[in-house]
Amino acid sequence: MKPFDERPSQDDEEDYGPSRSERRRNALDILKLAQQLVELPPSRIPKLNLPEDIIDEIGRTRKVTSHIARKRQMAFLAKQMRRHGDEAFVDARAALGEDRDRQRQEAAHMHRLEAARERIMEGGDTALGELFDRHPELDRQHLRSLVRQARAEREANKPLHAFREIYRILKDLEATE
């Protein structure tokens, strides 16, 4: 008989599989994926290489409008997805990851353009001079009048038409680079 204080060796330990916490995390990950799939436009679903029964279930889930019923339907969809395993959703996860990356890049691009517009609005002739140096083809008179008009619109609390036009010009300039 083994003494009481002796610990089991590596050979005596059994593999009990994933812990309860790990199983719960995996289930919540699948539920999150299911929600993302339901929110996608229907035209994108066939491109994701999903199992046929999951595509049908996504269609059924979209039709449910009641909050509680939709929550139940989402849980059922996640349960169906867990039956297929992770390898069935590799393409879908990759496509959704690419979407997030592209959205982040577009948001960063938009913020850069907005910051450049603010520099032009606040910086006066210095910022405009730098812009004209980089892009000599710009219509200087038109852009200067837009800046004056945008400042006046901002001060008068009027709709910011010129402000938006400056953004469009900057966006077009960046597209041609």
Image (spheres, helix red, strand yellow):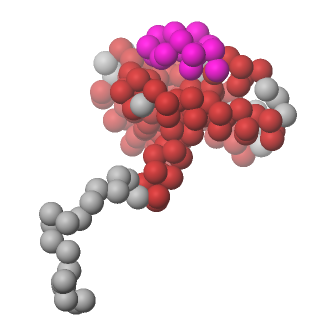
Q: What residue do we see at 20% from left, 66% from top?
A: 12
Note whether 108 is above or below 177 in the view shown.
below
Main SS of residues in magenta: helix
Examine the rendered structure and indicate whether residue 52 appears above or below residue 144.
Answer: above
Q: Position of residue 101 (x, y in %)?
A: 40, 33
Residue at 41% of width from left, 58% of height from top?
19
Picture mark count = 0
Q: Residue at x 31, y 18 (%)?
A: 177
Quadrant where the N terminus sits is: bottom left
Task: Judge whether residue 71 can be spotted in this image.
Answer: yes
Picture coordinates of residue 76, whole percent (x, y): 65, 33
Specify whether 165 is left or right of 153.
left
Q: Position of residue 54 (x, y in %)?
A: 56, 20
Q: Is residue 48 above or below residue 115?
A: above
Q: Position of residue 8 (x, y in %)?
A: 20, 74
| Position of residue 129 in the picture relative to residue 121 (left or right) | left
Q: Quadrant of residue 131?
A: top left
- Is-magenta flag for residue 45? yes
For the point 15% across and 66% down, which residue is it? 10
For the record, the magenta segment spans: 42-57
